[in-house]
Amino acid sequence: MRRQLGEFFESMQGQQNLAWADNAIKLAVEMTVAAVNRANVQGTVEQQAEQIRQVMVTVFPEAVALVREARSGLK
């Protein structure tokens, strides 16, 4: 019974880690989309592309860190 209980708790921990990873990835995507949506892009197509790139330079490292942390929790 102890073995089964231990296996059950281990399984629950794995599911909790997976849920946390999914939430972290979802947050990273939402954070990136929100930042891009808040950008007040103006000018030519090239200028707008550069403005979006600047938003991504700021937000992307944080999003990557969230995903990296989530993935490390699954190992």
Image (tube, grey):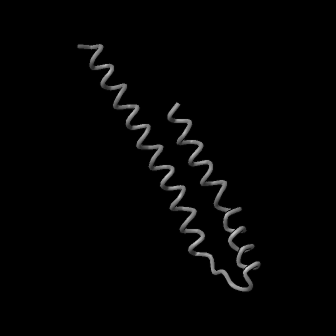
**Quadrant that contains the N terminus:** top left
In which quarter of the view is residue 48 placed? bottom right
Vertically, is 39 above or below 9?
Answer: below
Q: Residue at x 40, y 32 (%)?
A: 14
Which residue is pictured at 75% across the width and 73% down the height?
Answer: 50
Q: Position of residue 6 (x, y in %)?
A: 32, 19
Residue positioned 69% across, 84% down in the render: 42
Residue 52 x %, y %: 68, 71
Q: Which residue occupies the extreme left position in the image?
A: 1
Return the x and y of residue 8 as percentages of the image width and height.
30, 24
How many discs mark residues in the rendered view? 0
Q: Name the residue located 48 percent from the left edge and 54 percent from the top edge.
A: 26
Residue 23, how many percent across, how many down? 45, 50
Above or below, comparing residue 23 to residue 43 in the picture:
above
Left or right of 74: which side holds 44?
Answer: right
Q: Quadrant of residue 35?
A: bottom right
Q: Image quadrant of residue 46?
A: bottom right
Q: Is residue 6 above or below residue 11?
A: above
Name the side, left or right, on which 1 lies relative to 14: left
**Where 22 falls versus 44 (above or below)?**
above
User: Looking at this rendering, what residue extends furthest in the front direction?
Assistant: 45
Q: Nearer the viewer, residue 38 or 44?
A: 44
Front-lying residue, 18 or 6: 18
